Amino acid sequence: MMKVTATATRRGGWWVVEVPGVEMALTQARRLDQVSAMVADAVHLVEDVPAEDVEVVLDYEIGDSAALMEARAAHLQVESAAHAQECAARASRAAVAHLRRSGLSVRDIGVILELSPQRVSQLDRAGVRA
């Protein structure tokens, strides 16, 4: 497996792509989603490495990137929050299942976990389906 970093720069209607560290590896693509395949093919031709064995890390130059960096950071926060929420739900389902097996009522579990009885019932049903 060969890992390369490709730098894409927008010029006209094309992304011009350079691969620093791989001499003469230069290609272009209309869309960013085409770049990895184009780079893998270019590296294959220059380095004689099978294209499927080329891992491409894409970097792109698009001028002022402050807004881009802010958007990426916000997206990562959303992903992190969604992951945390899923982890909390999974832990809650496991706790509800454990407490129900222990013979506790939905209302008692709600008090222990600081959840409404309705939420405990939802988690109890979700645990049965999972």
Image (cartoon, rainbow, N blue to C red):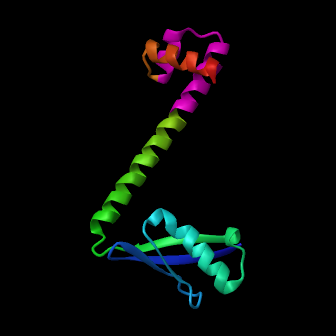
Please provide the residue range marked out in magenta: 89-113
x and y, in percent, of residue 31 in the image: 43, 65
Residue 75: where, in percent of width, then height? 39, 52
Up the image or down, 22 lies above or below 130; here it is: below
Image position, residue 46 (x, y; %): 65, 86
Q: Quadrant of the N terminus?
A: bottom right
- Identified at 51% across, 36% down, the residue is 86
Relative vertical location of residue 44 with respect to residue 76 in this rendering, above or below = below
Q: Main secondary structure of the magenta part?
A: helix
Q: Is residue 40 above or below residue 71?
A: below
Residue appearing at x 35%, y 54% in the figure: 74
Q: Nearer the viewer, residue 20 or 33?
A: 33
Q: Is residue 13 left or right of residue 7?
A: left
Membership of 30 in magenta stretch = no
Q: Position of residue 91 (x, y in %)?
A: 57, 31
Left or right, residue 53 beside residue 16: right
Residue under the point 62% across and 75% down: 41
